[in-house]
Amino acid sequence: MLNLSRRVVTQTTLVPLLLLAACESPSATSRLTAPLIEDVAQSVSANGSAVTMTVGDTTTLVQFSPFAQQRLAWGDVLTWVSKSPAVLSVTQSGLATAKVAGSSLVIVNFKKKVDTLAVTVTAAQVATITASAPSTTIVEGQTSQLTVVAEDASGQVIPAPPLVFSSSSTGTLTVNATGMVTAVVAGSATVTVQSGGVSASVNFVVSAAPNAPAPPPPSGTPIAVPQAPQSLSFTYPQVTGRSWILSPTDNLQNALNSAQRGDEIVLSAGATYTGNFVLPNKSGTAANGWVLIRSNRTLPAVGTRVTPAHASLMPRIVTPNVQPAIATSGAASGWWISGIEITIVPVLSYINYGLVALGDGSNKQNALSKVPSDLVIERSYVHGQPNIQTSRCIALNSARTAIMDSYVHECHLKGFDSQAILGWNGPGPFKIHNNTLAGAGENILFGGADPSIPNLIPSDIEITRNYIVTPVAWKGVWTKKNLFELKSAKRVLLQGNVFDGSWVDGQTGFAVVLKVSNQSGGCTWCETTDVTFRQNIFRNIGAGFSIQGLQGGSAHPVGGLLSRVAIEDNLVENVNVGQFAGEARIISVMNNVQSLAIRRNTLTTTGKLMQFRERTSCSSAMSLRTAITASSPRGTALASPR
């Protein structure tokens, strides 16, 4: 229940301040804003009952101030200030967001008039807690981030509840204040998260780290170390301009067209905005400010991966047809999407060709000057529908783009390729961090189509701390190929991910396929170079790594063979077991791979370990130093050049 207590400070109260301001220029006198309010706030207070909000609530305070309503009706521009912004933030449109329990005085000002509101923020009462982790089996030295969802007695998700984490055995496993679990030594431990008298637990098993690396190989052809990708670092944008607060019936495209850099567009949680919306190009770059599109509800903290359990905190942007729900126009830049559910209508008789299109994969985008850049999707829920054919969830044909802390799911087709994320006509850099990514064909693919921009190769790709999964329930329903594939890419790092779920279907069950491919004959410069797999877990797969210098059987020329690949400190387990049947081979090396290092991995298999087969001559500069925990008597298969 929201109550109001306010007091209008009259002109008499402000006389000494006005006399002081009169010594300034006329323009200064007409701008009695923040400095004046700060002075007035020292001597004003609110009487009577306070406005009461719960942590995470967002509401406009205009409705509780007849003074503000009257001034806005006259077209006046008001200034709002929260005296305790850590407790309660307020925008210049009067939109208040409750952050933590406490109280704050809110002052609204127009020139000589001041109104005050006393706001009390109470903590939501936690009734239930659920906790989960991308993987509960981790290796010594690795980490795993817990996802915690707290709900009140009515089942509503409580954003940012107070949480206390503990480990049953800190010698085996530690956990910090944000729920980041770190494996110390082999063993088992339980991590408990508590809020008040409510708690939840997750059981972890820590496996021993791989043995120390073997001595270096004899001198010979050196193995080139892959180059690291350029790293992106984005900071949640500061709103310096206008807040466009949209009701469920407002026109979202009009707001997208009208908003300027530094503005925010605030959508109503639970509301549905249906259409094919386009992010237009704004003059300037992200250095001049972002346009933030966000929910009016408070999400879990930045850096926390969302799940479908957080959907109630999000507005929905829905495509009603085969076109994207969100796309970019030209060289659009500086768009940040936070806490939005992006999906498709529940019933559609045609294939949807992508829910989010960042950049254009066609020949309309045939020059770098036309590529959109500085685009972020974070803490968002991007998904198709269980029974609708969706070719991909997100297309990355852009530059300087990040997909972070999001849940991307239900990206699937029957008889065709489908992806959670696909890119072929954007230069990068790309940051794909801390997401759940569920796709049927290839969960993530770069290449696969000829770029329209001459000499373009997707480059500088960071894929870190993601859960890359294909649900086994999709087997036989949607066409499956692999979990990760590169056909043309440069400087790619995959670190700290979990790859889960691959089987014989459209391919032979490999989790990873690396190759060079000139897909349609128009990309004579295509190549794949500088790829690093480090500290990942691969499980429930039909086979491990298919590594090819170039795509077998393709007559199209390429710019170079697959080169400079490192696979190190990874765990591969549960290969070719049960429903996850496949070729059973953990590593297959074919077609003249250049500079391949396979080091310090733990590979568990009851099938075939490795295959080497060359079309012309042997692979150049290869190092194999790894640990095998179980294998069949056949072990390694070697094939001579043909």
Image (tube, rainbow, N blue to C red):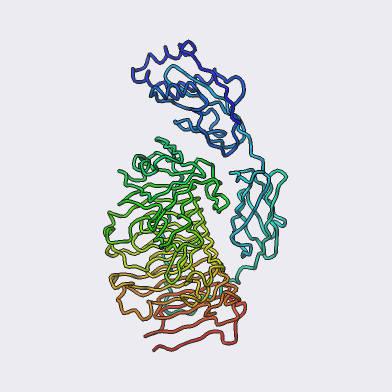
Q: Position of residue 66 (x, y in %)?
A: 49, 22
Name the residue located 39 percent from the left edge and 47 percent from the top edge: 335
Please indicate whether residue 191 sits to the left or right of residue 449 in the image. Answer: right
Please indicate whether residue 190 sits to the left or right of residue 450 in the image. Answer: right
Q: Position of residue 283 (x, y in %)?
A: 30, 43
* 423 or 504, nearer to the observer: 504
Q: Position of residue 343 (x, y in %)?
A: 46, 54
Name the residue located 58 percent from the left edge and 44 percent from the top edge: 159
Examine the rendering and report whether any part of residue 228 can be seen: no
Q: Quadrant of residue 540?
A: bottom right
Name above or below for residue 47 compared with residue 168. Answer: above
Name above or below for residue 470 compared with residue 283. Answer: below
Name the residue located 55 percent from the left edge and 66 percent from the top edge: 471
Please indicate whether residue 88 sits to the left or right of residue 596 in the image. Answer: right
Q: Quadrant of residue 589?
A: bottom left
Name above or below for residue 584 compared with residue 108. Answer: below
Q: Position of residue 414 (x, y in %)?
A: 45, 69
Please indicate whether residue 544 sits to the left or right of residue 554 in the image. Answer: right
Question: Could you tell me how many numbered marks the image carries?
Answer: 0
Examine the rendering and report whether any part of residue 469 can be seen: yes
Query: On the rendered image, what quadrant is the C terminus found in?
Result: bottom left
Query: On the rendered image, what quadrant is the N terminus found in?
Result: top right
Name the residue located 65 percent from the left edge and 61 percent from the top edge: 184
